[in-house]
Image (spheres, rainbow, N blue to C red):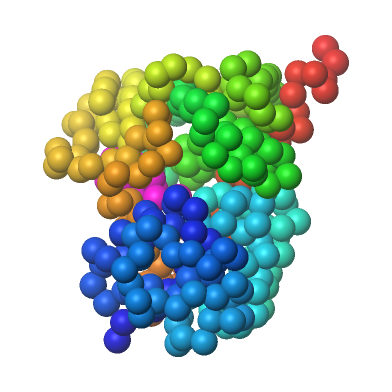
Amino acid sequence: MDFKFVIVGTGNISNTYCQAIEKIDNVEVVGIVSRNGQKPDALANANDVKIAPAISDIKSDYVGVILCTPNGLHHKAAIEAARLGKHVLTEKVLDISVESMDAMIQVCKENKVKLGVAYQRRMSPDNKVIKEMIESGKLGKIFGIDLTLKNYRDQAYYDSSEYRGTWSIDGGGCFIQQGAHYIDLYTWFFGMPEYVISALGTFTHDIEVEDHGAVILKHKDGKIGTIVASTATKPGFDAKFEIHSDKGTLILENDRITNWLIDDIPDPANTQDVKIHSGAQSASVADTSGHEAIISDFVQAVRENREPAVSGVSARKATELILKFYNNTIEKKCF
């Protein structure tokens, strides 16, 4: 039996989900929630897909929704869908405030529906290997983590929608928007730090949020992390994760192990030609394999009555950490 989705929102990311679903057996889109009555370009010729201005107006039989609305609106659609008994998969981030995220998690729990988040970088083979090695202690005592997220977006990107580059809807700039995927990986790998201090600024764009910044993180066990995020660094560079332990160093670039210098452990890098979206220079997603993996896992989670690979509770940590960056800037501290 086909698993039927309704997609909420018709922004550019909705096309990515439509294209991904086309490649998954027994999964289909049967409805679109659109305020302007338009379909995503990927479904322009799909005459059997229903369009409605609200989730409650969709009369088709379906199992779950995929939220493609701006960050700060995720909780509204998630709560509405959950109360209708529909499972919820949302584009990252979960939402932009602790209160909104907690409301989403609680309502989904009360209505016994699944809540998943599209942090698809967790599905990359090399990231899975590193996660297992960290949890098993194979990497030894980790003391340093350096994460560099030097993207580039031009002013036209921010001008393309009124909500882009805003606190009220986007929830912030390069950390919560472009950087969230890797900050999710940071919390997935290492958990939450005990202390953070940040320096943020707006340098090359006419927006109200940060376009460049740096953070220092200190964990309870002593390890120190640094994160640099940007949309001002031309022309844009692949994300780089450097992990240092008493056994050596490993480097991940765009979710692939590119340097393995760990004592007495063979390089576990996946040797297959896996396509992974970078996002360093453009928001457009040419390769949908990551989304295919997230959607497929979510469908199986519903069918098997288990938590998705990226649950709402787990994904909440990335936003919680980013909010600490915004609330613990150097400007707000005295030394």
Looking at the rendering, the stretch of residues picked out in magenta corresponds to 119-128
Please say if 101 is above or below 307.
above
Is residue 200 in the magenta section?
A: no
Query: Where in the figure is residue 287, as x and y percent of width and height?
Result: 28, 46
Farthest residue, direction top: 335
Query: Where in the figure is residue 184, as x and y percent of width and height?
Result: 51, 43
The residue that appears at 66% across and 71% down in the rendered structure is 79
Q: To which quarter of the image does residue 256 belong?
A: top left
Farthest residue, direction left: 272
Please say if 38 is above or below 202.
below
Q: To which quarter of the image does residue 329 belong?
A: top right
Q: Nearer the viewer, residue 244 or 296?
A: 296
Relative to 335, 105 lies left or right: left
The residue that appears at 55% across and 75% down in the rendered structure is 52
The residue that appears at 41% across and 22% down in the rendered structure is 236
Query: Where in the figure is residue 27, as x and y percent of width and height?
Result: 31, 74
Quarter of the figure with the N terminus: bottom left
Q: Nearer the viewer, residue 219 or 184?
A: 184
Please say if 205 is above or below 16.
above
Q: Main secondary structure of the magenta part?
A: helix
Query: Where in the figure is residue 136, as x and y percent of width and height?
Result: 38, 44
Q: To which quarter of the image does residue 245 belong?
A: top left
Tell me if residue 204 can be seen.
yes
Relative to 15, 170 lies left or right: right
Quarter of the figure with the C terminus: top right
Tell me if residue 224 can be seen.
no
Q: Nearer the viewer, residue 70 or 310?
A: 70
